Amino acid sequence: MDISNRGVDDEAKLANRNYIRWDTQGVEKIVEKEEEDIKAVADMINAIQKAQFNNHRHCFSGTHARTQGIIKDKLVVYDNLLKHLKQSMFDHGAEYPVVCRYSSEPGDPGLEDRIPQPRGFAIKVFNVKGDFLPGGIDIPT
């Protein structure tokens, strides 16, 4: 089922565009005070980890320590993707098993889930063929 709102003419126009790579200089604009925001988040996570250790003499994992939910399903890659989208695992039609995890920081089991805190989402895609980083060549996914 095609749920897009594009017609054939629109696809032809999109396929002939000269797309800019994501890493081209000038594509990403660093917003004012971004470095300060990043440092504030890192400081908050470090403070939570130190508090955990001081309370329990054991530090719960600092990132995505508290799983809120897991979903197992499949990722469907359609064979009719536009040329500029056909890269890596998206270069041909296929179905991949996936596991998605919703999680949150901090790792303190006594804190409510409703308090403001960093949130996480991860997708693990299995059975992908192709180039791997040197450390992962012999590790199946």
Image (spheres, helix red, strand yellow):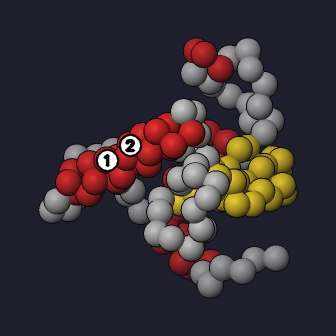
Residue that carries the numbered disc 2 in the rendered image: 46
Report if residue 30 is visible in the image: no
Q: In this picture, is 42 found above or below 118?
A: above
Instruction: Specify few, some or many for label 1: CA neighbours under 10 Å numbering under 14, 14-19, or 20 or more.
Output: few
Q: Amino acid under label 2?
A: Asn
The quarter in which the N terminus is drawn is bottom right
Residue that carries the numbered disc 1 in the rendered image: 43
User: Where residue 17 sits: x, y (%)?
Assistant: 41, 62
Residue plotted at (54% across, 33% down): 57
The quarter in which the C terminus is drawn is top right
Residue plotted at (44% across, 45% down): 51
User: Where residue 61 sits: x, y (%)?
Assistant: 57, 38
Judging depth in this view, the residue of 29 and 65 nearest the camera is: 65
Residue plotted at (54% across, 78% down): 10
Tell me the element at label 2: helix
User: Where residue 110 sits: x, y (%)?
Assistant: 61, 59
Q: Amino acid under label 1?
A: Asp
Q: In this picture, is 14 found above or below 7?
A: above
Tell me the element at label 1: helix
- Do residues under tags 2 and 1 come within 8 Å of each other at their CB atoms? yes
Q: Is residue 54 left or right of residue 138?
A: left
Judging depth in this view, the residue of 78 and 101 nearest the camera is: 101
